[in-house]
Each structure stands twice: as structure tokens, then as C-alpha cells.
Image (cartoon, rainbow, N blue to C red):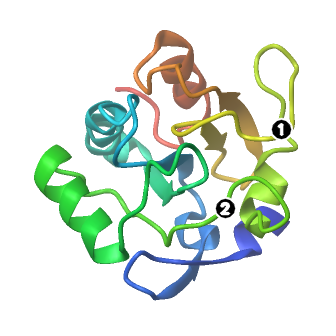
Amino acid sequence: MTELQNIGITTLGGAPTSLDEYSGRAVLVVNVASKCGLTPQYTALEKLAKDYSDRGLSVVGFPCNQFGGQEPGTAEEIETFCSTTYGVTFPLMEKIDVNGENRHPIYEQLVQTPDADGEAGDVQWNFEKFLVSPEGEVVARFRPRTEPDAPEVLAAIDKVLPVPTL
């Protein structure tokens, strides 16, 4: 188990967990928000979660209210919005900070990973994506405007999936 997989996180429903629950699977970690111009990315994230689940991909969302106050809701409001508006079935965690002095420890690890331009550091906005290998290593980072089904995201996912395409 890597340090990243060992960090305690909490589900939107309040249950303790960690990324170790997804050990052996690739995980796309995304900070999400319900009232953002990028919120429609939930559709592509849900499609990824469904289409790639059998090949070993899990999508995990972390609601965050740090960018323009775009995730102001309670856990129940977030859950209702995501399920009724976008049909989200992938797991959502508790609302956290991804930047600043109250940054969640999981994001302390994630933000050390550089993007394709070699830039590490703070999350830029909602819907920044981090790809974690089945071994628990962060292998790619995609900025918010990169769609979840963009060719470069799909290629990175395909490289780390534990079950190859038949």
C-alpha cells in the first residue's frame, strides 16, 4: 500500500475509507462542484465509470467549495443533485479543501504530481483530474478544462488499466 492509498478519507455519507479500497484498480480522482461551468463533465465522468469499470477503473469525486463558492450544498444536497441531474453512481467523498492551509492530506500528495506541461502545485479549479495506478502511484494529472473523455485522458487510463481490452 502506498502512502496515498493509506490516507484516511470520508465518504459523502460519513463513512471512513481510503483509496486502499480501490487497490488493484486505476482511480481517477476529481474535485467536483455542482454549480460550475464545468459541472457537465459529470456526464463524461459517469460514462467513464460505467464503461471502464469492468476493466478496473474507478472514478472518485471530492466535492470542493474553494472555487467561486460553486459547491455550497450539504452532503445530502450534493448527493441529490449529482444523482438526479447527472445520474452519478460513482463514489463521492465528503466536501474538502484541495488548496490552502486546510488542504486535505490526500491532495497534499496529489498536487505534487506535474501536469503534461510539467507544472505541479495547487489545483487550478473544479474538475482537475488525477490518475492513480492500480499500485497507488499518481501517474497523470489533467487540468480542469481537459474533458474526462479527451483522447489524452483515455490513453493514460488505457495504459494503467489492470484488465486489457479484448
In depth, the one of 96 and 49 nearer the eye is 96
Q: Is residue 74 left or right of residue 129?
A: left
Label 1, secondary structure: give it.
loop
Q: Is residue 18 left or right of residue 151?
A: right
Label 2 Cα neighbours within 10 Å, binned few <14 / some 14-19 / many ≥20 = some
Whether residue 1 is visible to the viewer of this picture, yes or no, is no
Query: Residue at horizontal 66%, vertical 46%?
Result: 132
Q: Position of residue 85 (x, y in %)?
A: 14, 47
In depth, the one of 99 and 6 nearer the eye is 99
Label 1 Cα neighbours within 10 Å, binned few <14 / some 14-19 / many ≥20 = some
Image quarter where the N terminus lies is bottom right
**Residue 107: quarter of image:** bottom right
Question: Where does label 2 land, which residue?
Answer: 97
| Residue found at the very far bottom of the displayed protein | 15
Query: Residue at horizontal 54%, vertical 30%?
Result: 157
Q: Position of residue 29 (x, y in %)?
A: 56, 49
Q: Position of residue 25 (x, y in %)?
A: 54, 53
Query: Residue at horizontal 74%, vertical 36%?
Result: 139
Question: Where does label 1 land, which residue?
Answer: 113
